[in-house]
Image: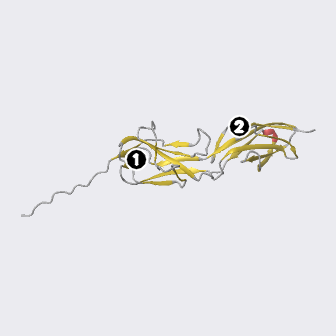
């Protein structure tokens, strides 16, 4: 008796963030043990995840935080005793990076005309550069922080914004980070709360008291 297997999810266009728990589902008949594997290059090469009981119909995939991102991911399941009995995702899905801006946030004051360190948490391997932008109207309009040709900065987790522009002061500032290699809709993270851009306070010398 030759078994039958079929991947039911992921089957194309899903977004699996690194550092999260995702699930691989299948249907099968006449198969005892299922070999579960993934590819990051549209099936060009496969890496085994586990061999599990086929009757459960699913595998819990804990994607590591340092996993390589990909827009060409697929999964494959096959009978562990007969690799010819197999099925793969119908189309590619996405392993996407994770970003979370930590500074500035939650009303943090940013001083116009002075340097400020933008900081973010990042998960996922393969994002060398990102784009940083700021908004002075709560995300209505965005301006590149770096004004060179490609507007990118190294994805190191921080960037020295020097100087912070002083043309528009605001209480509704936002920062966003963009990974241009990510699929549409998954590439950016806006700050979770607004921050302030306020003017620098000049130090005024106190008048001296004349001695009599």
Tell me what residue is drawn at x 45 percent, y 38 percent.
Answer: 141
* Residue 196 tag number: none
Q: Position of residue 211 (x, y in %)?
A: 9, 64
- Cα separation, mark 1 vs mark 2, equals 40 Å
- Camera-side residue: 55 or 89? 89
Tell me what residue is drawn at x 83 percent, y 37 percent.
Answer: 28
Report the residue marked by disc 1. 108
Q: Position of residue 7 (x, y in %)?
A: 78, 38
Report the residue marked by disc 2. 12
Q: Residue furthest front?
A: 149
In this rendering, the answer to whether 90 lies above or below 132 is above
Q: The residue tagged with tag 2: helix, strand or loop? A: loop
Q: The residue tagged with tag 1: helix, strand or loop? A: loop
- Camera-side residue: 42 or 191? 42
Tell me what residue is drawn at x 32 percent, y 48 percent.
Answer: 199
- Camera-side residue: 98 or 140? 140
Q: Are marks 1 and 2 in contact (CB under 8 Å)?
A: no
Q: Is residue 75 left or right of residue 152?
A: right
Q: Position of residue 136 (x, y in %)?
A: 41, 41
Q: Position of residue 184 (x, y in %)?
A: 60, 39
């Amino acid at each position: 008796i030759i078994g039958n297997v079929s991947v039911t999810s992921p089957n194309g266009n899903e977004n699996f963030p690194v550092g999260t728990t995702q699930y691989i589902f299948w249907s099968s008949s006449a198969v005892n043990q299922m070999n579960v594997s993934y590819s990051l290059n549209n099936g060009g090469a496969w890496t085994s995840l586990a061999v599990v009981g086929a009757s459960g119909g699913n595998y819990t995939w804990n994607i590591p935080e340092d996993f390589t991102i990909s827009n060409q991911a697929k999964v494959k399941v096959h009978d562990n005793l007969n690799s010819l009995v197999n099925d793969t995702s119908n189309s590619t899905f996405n392993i996407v990076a994770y970003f979370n801006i930590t500074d500035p946030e939650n009303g943090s004051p940013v001083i116009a005309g002075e340097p400020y360190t933008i900081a973010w948490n990042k998960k996922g391997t393969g994002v060398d550069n990102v784009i940083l932008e700021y908004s002075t109207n709560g995300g209505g309009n965005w301006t590149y922080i770096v004004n060179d040709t490609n507007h990118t900065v190294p994805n190191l987790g921080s960037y020295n914004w020097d100087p912070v522009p002083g043309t528009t002061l605001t209480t509704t500032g936002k920062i966003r980070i963009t990974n241009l290699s990510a699929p549409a809709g998954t590439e950016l993270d806006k700050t979770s709360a607004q921050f302030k851009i306020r003017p620098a306070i000049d130090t005024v010398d106190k008048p001296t008291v004349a001695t009599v």
